[in-house]
């Protein structure tokens, strides 16, 4: 089976090492109205091309950017980065979650699941915008609770996944509700073995991961390097436990890391009376983690942690080549 990239379909054999959940950029609704200039498009492309070249040096040939429609998705920018770097980039259709009022545009909140599916299937079949670039994955997301609108979007995504055969990549908050995502997808007739339940890094106990894998899906240990959420040693322990537990076929590794933010101001709230403290105590390390940390971090800093837990080179390739291939291409 072939896999759709922003540059067109490619064969499963040419996927190579895959990072299943990364971003070139993300942005938030309304940001485009800011009179203050943000990072120019040409500079964003430059940063991304540099990062793609660094990843190519680590054997990565495919970069999945599951940015949903409502989080600043720009498929033409992805296509340009892909063309200039040679990296195979896969983009997504789908909506984000309602948590903190980030995602799901108002108009689409009023729609039935069938209408939402119509949008996703239109993008899958006819392409996105004038350049008609086609998504290779469907993205879904839930927040701290699974809300009514999120549920409808998931039901719509399930119809689109069932009809198109595209894989599903999910976002979870605090690693919660993966099984509920599976329930909704399964009820919609989706093949759970083509679903990656994402951001499962924050579990420290094995049972919820086993529960997800038992139903056939992949689990994403896919926020590697975000030590604010949980330590990479804990992530490495989790991966080692999954492998030791016979679940090596159902683990995907990634970082959910971004190359840049176009926004001219912070995309999060800082109380005015905390601004000085934030700039002094938090910002330097936050910016280092967000922009200083290269995309090659997974290879330079995380893989050695897996090696020290007994995972050999063949197992690493299994996690970075074979598993993403089965997720994306079904073979
Ligand atoms: Zn993400």
Image (spheres, rainbow, N blue to C red):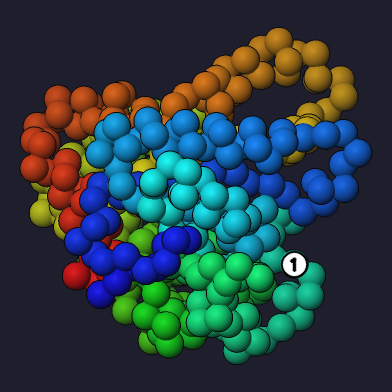
Check the picture and name the quadrant holding the N terminus: bottom left
Above-or-below relation of 41 to 290: below
Side of 307 relative to 41 (left or right): left
Q: Residues within 10 Å of mark 1 (few under 14, many from 20)?
A: some
Side of 163 relative to 57 (left or right): right
153 or 32: which is nearer to us? Answer: 32
User: Looking at the image, can residue 79 be seen?
Assistant: yes
156 or 40: which is nearer to us? Answer: 40
Above-or-below relation of 301 to 315: above
Q: Mark 1 highlights which residue? A: 105
At numbered mark 1, what does the secondary structure look like: helix, strand or loop? loop
Check the picture and name the quadrant holding the C terminus: bottom left
Expressed as whole percent of the image width and height from the top left, the position of residue 321 reads 21, 51
Above-or-below relation of 128 to 269: below
Residue in the picture at 62% in, 80% down: 119
Looking at this rendering, what residue extends furthest in the top direction? 280
Residue in the picture at 60% in, 86% down: 118
Expressed as whole percent of the image width and height from the top left, the position of residue 23 reads 51, 45
């Amino acid at each position: 089976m072939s896999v759709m990239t922003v540059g067109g379909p490619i064969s499963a054999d040419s996927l190579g090492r895959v990072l299943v959940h990364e971003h070139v950029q993300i942005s938030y609704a309304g940001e485009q109205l800011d009179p203050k200039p943000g990072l120019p498009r040409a500079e964003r492309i430059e940063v991304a091309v540099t990062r793609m070249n660094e990843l190519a040096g680590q054997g990565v040939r495919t970069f999945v950017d599951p940015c949903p429609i409502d989080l600043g998705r720009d498929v033409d920018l992805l296509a340009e980065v892909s063309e200039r770097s040679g990296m195979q980039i896969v983009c997504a259709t789908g909506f984000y979650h309602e948590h903190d009022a980030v995602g799901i545009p108002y108009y689409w909140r009023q729609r039935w699941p069938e209408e939402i599916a119509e949008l996703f299937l239109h993008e899958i079949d006819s392409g996105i915008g004038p350049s008609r670039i086609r998504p290779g994955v469907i993205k879904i997301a839930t927040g701290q609770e699974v809300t009514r609108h999120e549920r409808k979007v998931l039901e719509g995504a399930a119809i689109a996944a069932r009809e198109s055969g595209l894989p599903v990549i999910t976002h979870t908050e605090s690693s919660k509700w993966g099984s509920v995502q599976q329930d909704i997808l399964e009820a919609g007739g989706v093949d759970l073995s083509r679903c990656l339940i994402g951001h499962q890094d924050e579990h420290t106990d094995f049972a919820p991961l086993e529960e997800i894998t038992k139903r056939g899906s992949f689990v994403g240990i896919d926020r590697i390097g975000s030590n604010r959420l949980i330590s990479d040693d804990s992530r490495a322990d989790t991966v080692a436990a999954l492998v030791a537990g016979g679940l090596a076929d159902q683990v995907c590794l990634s970082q959910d890391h971004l190359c840049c933010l176009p926004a001219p101001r912070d995309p999060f709230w800082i109380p005015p009376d905390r601004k000085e403290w934030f700039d002094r105590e938090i910002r330097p390390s936050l910016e280092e983690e967000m922009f200083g940390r290269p995309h090659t971090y997974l290879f330079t800093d995380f893989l050695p942690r897996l090696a020290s837990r007994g995972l050999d080179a063949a197992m690493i390739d299994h996690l970075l080549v074979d598993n993403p291939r089965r997720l994306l291409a079904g073979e």
